[in-house]
Amino acid sequence: MKTICTVLICILLIFNFSTVMAIPLEKTFTDETYGYQIQYPAKWKARIYRSGIVIAEINSPTETAGFQIRFTKSDKSHAEYKRTYIAKYKKDLNAILINQKERKINGMAAVEYNLKGGRNGTFYLKSYIIFKNHSDNIFIIQAGSPFSQMGETDLLFSLMAESFRIYD
């Protein structure tokens, strides 16, 4: 019985991985005003969307999953900015932090947060804070999908975030 369960779990993991990998990042969205670009799947829609600190969004065809690109400046230390950001994020979205990890995205210091939030914990939220080198500029990528789609969207969100590039 244990062997059968292990095999079934492996099949599900392979299916989820192959489903995401079957969606290549074929398009590139470029925002010349803020000097960045990001890749996304061909069937998704990207657009400039200026609202507060939100500067763009990229959505799935059904608009059940998507990204917002945000931009801000801060004179706080990276550590202080991260503490303030995650506390506000958790409060505003009633989110529970699943995990966080420090990383680099194209040579820039970044932190990745994975959260469960929204009404009754129904949303999977992934957020990246990217600190532009030698600058007080901060880009934030916020991604989300229904929590039930986390297995399908997690790797795709990561691949899209990894494609994020700032140019001068």
Image (cartoon, rainbow, N blue to C red):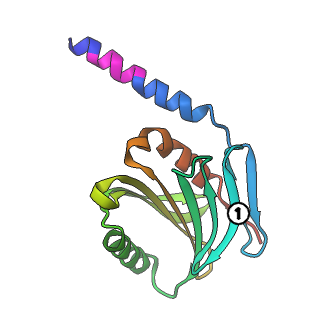
* Position of residue 82 in the picture relative to residue 47 (left or right): left
Q: Is residue 23 above or below residue 60?
A: above
Extreme residue in the front direction: 62
At which x and y percent is residue 132?
61, 72
Query: Could you tell me what secondary structure mostly forms the magenta stretch?
Result: helix
Above or below for 43 versus 74 = above
- Tell me how many marks there are: 1
The question of residue 9 being in magenta is answered with yes
Give left or right: position of 157 versus 43.
Answer: left
Point out the image quarter for the C terminus.
bottom right
Q: Residue at x 36, y 76 (%)?
A: 88
59 drawn magenta: no
Q: Quadrant of the N terminus?
A: top left
- Which range of residues does the magenta coloring cover? 5-11
Residue designated by label 1: 47
Q: Quadrant of residue 167?
A: bottom right
**Badge 1 amino acid:** Arg
Q: For the residue carrying disc 1, how many other residues have a C-alpha within 10 Å: few (<14), some (14-19), or many (20+)?
A: some
Position of residue 137 measured from the top left corner of the image (x, y, whole percent): 60, 79
Q: Is residue 74 above or below residue 127?
A: below
- Is 124 rendered above or below residue 17? below
Residue at 47% in and 25% down:
14
In the image, farthest residue toward the left: 1
Residue 38 seen = no
Closer-to-camera residue (109/119):
119
Determine whether, in the image, residue 146 is placed left or right of residue 134: left
Residue at figure coordinates x 39%, y 80% from the top left: 80
Element type at marker 1? strand
Is residue 114 in view from this perspective? yes
Residue 5 position within the rendered picture, expressed as x and y whole percent measured from the top left: 27, 18
> Residue 150: x percent and y percent?
42, 44
